[in-house]
Amino acid sequence: MAGGFFAVLDDIAALMDDIAVTSKIATQKTAGILGDDLAVNAEKATGFLSSRELPVLWAITKGSFINKLIIIPLALVLNYFFPIAIKWALVLGGLYLAYEGVEKIIEYFFHRSKTGHEVIEEAKEEDAEAEEKAKVKSAVTTDFILSVEIVIIALGTVLDKPLTTQILTVFVVGFLATVGVYGIVALIVRMDDAGFSLIKRSNDKGFLAILGNLLVKALPLVIKALAVIGTLALILVAGGIFVHNIDALHHLFPQLPAIAKDAAIGLIAGIAAVVVMTIGKKIISLVKPN
């Protein structure tokens, strides 16, 4: 009886060891996409009143956890019964990311209001609450697509392992991705508050005051940098999804550096998606009864 109990403990310890090793490998494999996830979501979680930053971030974090709870079981089931569906889900998600990235570029250069997100258009009338909900919805949607990519990459590293190890490894990576990404985002959006606190404690004198002022002045620059990096990340991730999942694109222009190829394909796909969506909206507005 005691021998059987200790044998079970032995099996559990061995399983935990396997999960620790596979989780570490899967996390390393997803490091690139996690960096993009951080850049994109940090940019989306900023730009609110100071009092609303953490509540908004918490709403996005909860959405991210729900995304993982939907994606992970679905990915495991599809991978077992219908693996081709995962590939096409990634491609469709890539189209959305490319569309959103190009739309941001168009908005920046032509100073027009967003036409790709109806929910944001409805928030134009200085309605902060509606705009906040729209940004949270947009961030959670983008997180969903990036989470699909993270989960698929993590799953791909443990396909030769037992099903239990696959399930637990993917759940661990998904949990770490959400906690890690949004934990860092929380630190970024509270940089100015930390700076003001240091200035107050030091009576604006000495090293702490210098550090506090640096944090306060750095936050707007960090946010602007994240806006640029986040937009580039959307296009690069989209291009990478297309290159790795569409054979014709995978073998196209092999002499080009991978990052240039991903950027070019993501940009072209995003422009095409914006054109199609704009034409579609025009047609709908013409046929829709007043």
Image: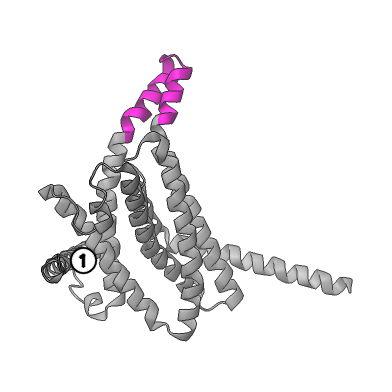
Image coordinates for residue 135, horizontal then vertical, percent: 33, 51
Q: Can residue 259 be seen in this view?
A: no
Residue 67 figure quarter = bottom left
In the image, the segment drawn in magenta is 193-219
Image coordinates for residue 73, horizontal then vertical, percent: 51, 73
Instruction: Answer with left or right where residue 153 lies relative to residue 105.
Output: right
Q: Name the residue under label 1.
A: 261
Front-lying residue, 231 or 274? 274
* SS label for mark 1: helix
Front-lying residue, 274 or 285? 285
Q: Is residue 48 visible?
A: yes
Image coordinates for residue 49, horizontal then vertical, percent: 36, 36
- Residue drawn at x 42%, y 20% is 199
Q: Main secondary structure of the magenta part?
A: helix
Give neighbour class at mark 1: few <14, some 14-19, many 20+ (Cα, 10 Å).
many
- Residue drawn at x 43%, y 69% is 153
- Residue drawn at x 34%, y 40% is 48
Q: Quadrant of the N terminus?
A: bottom right
Question: In the rendered structure, does residue 203 fall within the stretch colored magenta?
Answer: yes
- Residue drawn at x 45%, y 43% is 55
Q: In this view, does 224 lie above or below 2?
A: above
Amino acid tagged 1: Lys
Image coordinates for residue 123, horizontal then vertical, percent: 26, 49
Q: In this view, does 202 lie above or below 115?
A: above
Front-lying residue, 141 or 93? 141
Q: In which quarter of the image is the C terminus?
A: bottom left
Instruction: Answer with left or right where residue 154 lies relative to residue 90.
Output: right
